[in-house]
Amino acid sequence: MFLYDQIAESIRQEISGASLQPGDRLPSVRDMAAKWQCTIGTVQRAYEELARQGLVVSRHGQGTRVVKMTSVEETVPLRRATLVHRAEAFLLEVLTAGYSEAEVEQSLRLALDRWRALTQQPIEPPEHQLRFVGSHDPAVAWIAAHFSEIVPGYTSQLTFAGSLGGLMALASGEADLAGCHLWDEESDTYNVPFVRRLLFGQRVALLTLAHRRLGFMTVPSLSSGLTHLRDLAAAQLRFVNRQRGAGTRIWLDAHLQRLNIAPERIPGYERELRTHSEVAQAIAEGQADVGLGVEATALAFGLNFIPLTQERYDFVVPLSSWEKPSVQALAQWLGTAQAKRSIKTLGGYDLIETGQVRWVG
C-alpha cells in the first residue's frame, strides 16, 4: 500500500467512525506532512483521492472539509469506498506474495462459506431473494457467488446448517430450498426417505445438483495406509468430524456402526466443524491429520483425497417454492451445458443427472 493510500485510509476510518464529523476541517497539508513525515505532494494526493470519492471538499481559504451527508443513502459511497480500498490493499498484498487471482477468488469464497456457517441468523424473506439452508457444498457456494448472473434480478442467501437443518428449515417455512445428501441405510438411497418423513404430506421436487465423491482428506505428506473406513481407528490419526445432522456425519456414523467401530476409538471424533471447508482448513493448518470431505474441497485446499463413496446432492424444493420464477430459472440453468462446465471446473463431481427433477409426495 502506498503512503498516500495509508493517509487516505486513516482519514476514511475517522470519518466512518465519527471521529471526523461533517463540516470538520482536515489538518493542512503541511501539518499532515509533518505528522506522517512525508512530502506535501503525498498528502495532496491523499486529499485528492478522498475528494474523488466524494468524502471531502477543498475550497480556497476554507481548507479541506468533510462533506455533509444528509441521509443514510449518502453514506453508502463512504462504506463502499472503504471496503473497496481494503479489498485492493488485500489484493496487492497477496498478489505480491505470489498468489494467483484464481486462488484469491477461491479463498474468499471458502472464507465466506465458513462465515455463513458461523453466523446463522433468522432468515427473513425479502423480495427477490432466494433463501437456501442446508448442507455445505463448493458448487452451491459457487452458484451463490454468481447467482445474480444466473438469475438476473435476484440474489441468494445461504445458511450452511447441514442436510437435516435444511429440511427442518423447509418444514418451518424459513427456507425456499434446501441442500441435502442424506443416506438412508435401510433403503440404501439418498434423500427421499428423509423428505417423506420430515415433509410429510407435501409435494416436493428433488432437483439434482450432482453426484459427488466423498472421502478422506489428508495432508499430501501423510502416508498412513488409509484406503477404507475401517483403517481410521487403526491408524490412530487425529480426526476432525462434522456436526450432528450433517449428511456426512450421518453417513459416517452409520458405517462405523456397520463395521463395529466405537467412535471413542477414533482420536478427535468429538471435535465437530460445520463445513467441508472448515475440516479442510483444520487439516491444512496442522490441527488434524484426516477428516471426511468432498473432493472439490480437498482440491481447493491442496489436500490429498482418498475416495470412499459417491453421494447424491439434491436441492429439495416444496411445490410452493418450485413455482417461483427464481427457482424455475435456477432449474433451467442447471440443465445447460454452461452449468455443467462451471461445476466441472471445481472437480470431484459426476454431472450425468445434473438438472434432473424427481417428485416426492
Image (cartoon, rainbow, N blue to C red):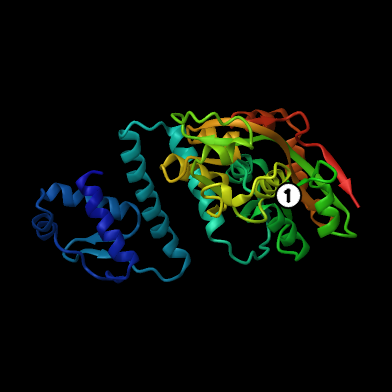
Q: Is mark 1 on a helix, strand or loop?
A: helix
Image location of residue 32, percent across then percent down: 13, 58
Of the pair 136 and 149, the residue shown nearer to us: 136
Of the pair 131 and 211, the residue shown nearer to us: 211
Position of 109 with respect to 101 (left or right) is right
Residue 88, quarter of picture: top left
Position of 244 with respect to 24 (left or right) is right
Q: How crowded is mark 1: few (under 14 residues within 10 Å), some or many (20 or more)?
A: many
Residue 172, quarter of picture: bottom right
Q: Compared to 319, does 89 lie above or below?
A: above
How many marks on residues? 1
Image location of residue 189, percent across then percent down: 82, 41
Of the pair 195 and 37, the residue shown nearer to us: 195
Residue 347 appears in the picture as rendered = no
Give the residue pinned by disc 1.
Answer: 326
Residue 30 appears in the picture as rendered = yes
Quadrant showing the N terminus:
top left
Image location of residue 237, percent across then percent down: 50, 40
Image location of residue 273, percent across then percent down: 54, 52
Of the pair 124 and 166, the residue shown nearer to us: 166
Amino acid type, mark 1? Ser
- Picture residue at 48% right of the left edge, 36% below the top: 301
Position of 123 with respect to 356 (left or right) is left
- Picture residue at 71% right of the left edge, 34% below the top: 310
- Picture residue at 53% right of the left edge, 58% below the top: 118
